[in-house]
Image (cartoon, rainbow, N blue to C red):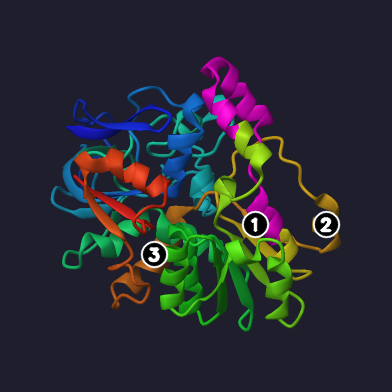
Amino acid sequence: MKAVAWHGKRDVRVDTVPDPTIQEPTDAIVRITSSGICGSDLHLYEVLGPFLDEGDILGHEPMGIVEEVGSEVTELAAGDRVVVPFNISCGTCFMCGQGLQSQCETTQVHEHGMGASLFGYTKLYGQVPGGQAEFLRVPFGNTLPIKVPEGPPDDRFVYLSDVLPTAWQAVEYGAIPDDGTVVVLGLGPIGDMCTRITQQRSHRVIGVDLVPERLERARSHGVEVFDLNEHDKDLAEVIRGVTDGRGPESVIDAVGMEAHGSPVAQLAQRVTGLLPDPLAEPLMEKAGIDRLHAFHLAIDIVRRGGTISLVGVYGGMADPLPMLRIFDKQIQLRMGQANVRNWTDDILPLLQDGDPLGTDGFATHHVPLDEAPQAYEMFQKKEDGAVKVLLKP
């Protein structure tokens, strides 16, 4: 089969690799019909090379058609249409029972002290072959895949793999009161979807970005927006000015370590990515420096006693935090990988009752799998209005 494989910093290729096979009686083989490129994939493209091996198959946002199931799979059959969550969770352990599928005890990566394994996402998360491919082996066939109906296009359902539950959890963790305001920092795929979910819940939402196309996209959906290029030095003061002088009740940081600013940290990330793996791995794990511009903005912007929901991915282990400021403002912090299967039963009915979140038109680009290298470069450079790219095997 063909699959998108990592070959080095900013070097992904479409390779021919062996087809996946049933390895456990609870496995399923899925023929992929759509697979997203995620903002988190750009971390692999740019800075997480020390935790990848050449030839690793990328991708964690797939959906498709079941081709084959193992002997113990009773909830799926060949021909079923399914979405595959990005975190690999058994659905039966203690953590899964708590709704913390991202911490699944069956697939935790103990070697690196990490949570549940992820499809297509480095040695830190199990080095499991990903879904930017023609076929994917999916474990836990009875509990992990999400069955979806025939009829609507893939675009209606594919975001159940990551974008929708990640944004949904970010909004839930934001603890926005009924009459509250939320500021979303970063209007990439997750931030954009956060604005749509908060609007669907009738909250006031303010979006912040520095990419004109992303600002216009959010504005076209009725979101109040601020351009960081115009307000980089006074953004918090400007937002307080439109929120009764206090700031919003909630801020969602949907940017993470790709944040604008912090040139020293940016340089440290780049240097780390160029080191030989034996030197880079411990440096990234124990002394990684994130670009914290967005997080510091969130701390400044949020109202005293408010909540910050961190959904943008951070990877550093030695990041300095302004603890006095966080403590003094009595800020609540919530964060973590999305517990996909905890939210999908709540989200799926929305997708079957019209399209209130605008998923059908959410992707900006549909690209053949063979053109994945060009798509990665376009997405990384934010060219041609790229917000969400779907690969089509």
Q: Which of marks 1 and 2 is nearer the N terminus?
A: 2
Pointers 2 and 3 in contact (CB under 8 A)? Answer: no
Which of these two is toward me, 314 or 99?
314
Q: Classify mark 2: residues with Cα within 10 Å, few (<14), some (14-19) or many (20+).
A: few
Instruction: Describe the element under mark 1 as helix, strand or loop.
Output: strand
Q: Which amino acid does label 3 sit on?
A: Asp
Q: According to the image, label 3 marks what residue?
A: 345
Instruction: Give the answer, above or below, for where 276 lies relative to 44.
Output: above
Q: Earlier in the sequence, mark 1 or mark 3?
A: 1
Mark number, residue 240: none
Residue at 86% in and 61% down = 328
- Give the label, 1 or 3, closer to the camera: 1
Mark number, residue 325: 2
Instruction: Give the answer, above or below, for where 326 lies relative to 90.
Output: below
Q: Classify mark 3: residues with Cα within 10 Å, few (<14), some (14-19) or many (20+).
A: few
Mark number, residue 334: 1
Instruction: Describe the element under mark 3 as helix, strand or loop.
Output: helix
- Magenta extent: 269-298
